[in-house]
Image (cartoon, grey):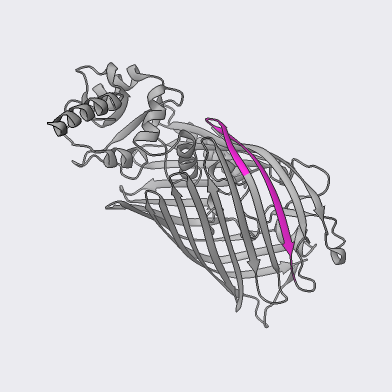
Amino acid sequence: MKHKLAVSLGVLLLASPALAEVRISGFASIVGGKVIDGTGVDEFDLPPTFLADYPLVGAYEEEISFEPDSLFGLQFSADLLDGLSATAQLVSRGANDFDVDFEWAYISYEVNDNWTVQGGKKRLPLYYYSDFFDVGYAYPWVRPPADNYTWQIFNYTGLSALYNYLIGDWTMSGQLYYGSEDDEPNKLLSEFFFGEATREIWKDIGGLVVQLNYDWLDIRLTHMQYTNERYIGGEQQTWDGSTERKGKFYGLSVNVEYESWMLLTEINRLDLSGTDLDTYMVTFGYRFGDFLPYASYSDFDDGEGGEVHNTTSVGVRWDFHPSAAFKVQYDEVKDNGGPGLKVAGDSESFSFGVDLVF
Amino acid sequence: MKKLCCSILLSLFSLQALAGIAVIVHPDNADALDKKSISNLYLGKTKRFPGGAQAVPVNLEVGQASRGDFDSNVLGKSSSQLKSYWSKKVFTGKGTPPKELANDDEVMKLVSSNPNIIGYIDSSNVNDSVKVVAEF
């Protein structure tokens, strides 16, 4: 599949060399870090661990490591004229032993000034930072707060329609999307949670994103629904006797960048067949020229005795170069999970690195 | 009289402060553009001139003196904030930043040859082949 895709994209790119303008852009993050102090989780034989990136299982331990958050991405975009373009994104991640994968491969068609239709494999635009999660340069932290970004599926294959309207001083933009994802083995569930090869299926993913932007204010509302099926070690899971369960996701994000002040907030709820998984985060920052110190708090809570954890972070971003930023960050995780539901225990960690785009 | 003096002084000062960057279009382009509409074009929020014709903004490369001034005075962002803004769009398939040119000459050449293009250069380099729509 991967080879076929590469070949057909190659053909697309080569088909009309005189007409097609191919743009190559990319992003990279080289990040090192370690756990300074942590409890681990005795019942899982887990040493002191900081799970910095849930979907990719980017986990730091007491030995310094550059693998959990480091990555390298290349994006190829061929403009085929008259509003048609083809885009592919290749990403190599330390958390995956630097294997190279197609994260994106889609065709895009600009229907008019306001609407663009896209088809193929894309990032799921679930949370505010989901669809540019890999592009560290685009946000202040070393990585988006891990407690909030705990979802298992981060790509989907399907269709989406992007819109963009200017209404007075406001821009309204967003996305409607529909698709599915069948991930086997799913990294987070297989490696971290169940310790057994897990196939995670999200069917009939349907979502809507509405983003309102006014100069210094950015508001994003989102809703998404899907149907979940899961096989652990080849065996189909059931929930209350059913092989399927419904997930309904709601999210609100309000971001302010006023003069030198920055306030980033996000609150989300995933209603998964009756259980509410609630997350929120808030980040304050203040720019001193090229320096942006910030403090952040994020929280995950699915109820009394369930999975409950939060992270307090402080850090500094320094834009030392027009295309690159240096970051240092300290994270303190409190894992208050109920019996059998701790994730990685309490921890204090330190990480630093460089994010760049080109 | 005092008021007059003040306003003359003020206008002298503001002239000095403003004589920096000239936003330029093709001489045939009859559109009036204010700061907001220029900023909307450069941030990819609109793709047309107020008159309805397609608009293609061109940028100067980072490092050119006018680029930093344009980013902060007209777009209200630092060059790195702007880079973050565009990297979100580029890597989510939501937009492409304006093409970057190496110097004022290249901007002049493109603008004077195509009515759809809008650019900006150092005011002192403006000649008759282009029309100035705003100065900052």
Q: Which residues are magenta?
A: A316-337
Image-based side of A61 in relation to A5, left or right: right
> Is A132 in front, or is A284?
A284
Asked which quadrant contains residue A185, the reply is bottom right
Q: Residue furthest bottom?
A: A241
In the rendered structure, does residue A320 fall within the stretch colored magenta? yes
Q: Is residue B3 left or right of residue B118?
A: left
The residue drawn where x is 28% and y is 27% is B18
- Can residue A30 be seen here? The reply is no
Q: Reply yes or no: does residue B83 show up in magenta.
A: no
Q: Residue A25: give x, y in percent of width and height.
A: 52, 34
- Residue found 69% across the figure and 40% down from its top: A352
> Residue A325, image x and y in percent?
59, 36
Say if A356 sits above or below A146 in the image: above
What x and y, as percent, mark residue A339? 79, 74
Q: Is residue B8 visible?
A: yes
Q: Position of residue B102 (x, y in %)?
A: 41, 20
Q: Reply above or below: A253 against A68.
A: below
Please identify the dominant SS of the magenta region: strand
Q: Is residue A237 left or right of residue A127?
A: right
Front residue of this view, candidates A187 and A295:
A295
Q: Nearer the viewer, residue A327 or A151?
A: A327
Quadrant including the C terminus of chain A? top right
How many numbered marks does the figure carry?
Answer: 0
Among the 4 quarters of the image, the one containing residue A47: bottom right
Residue at 67% over, 78% down: A239
* Residue found at the very far left of the displayed protein: B1
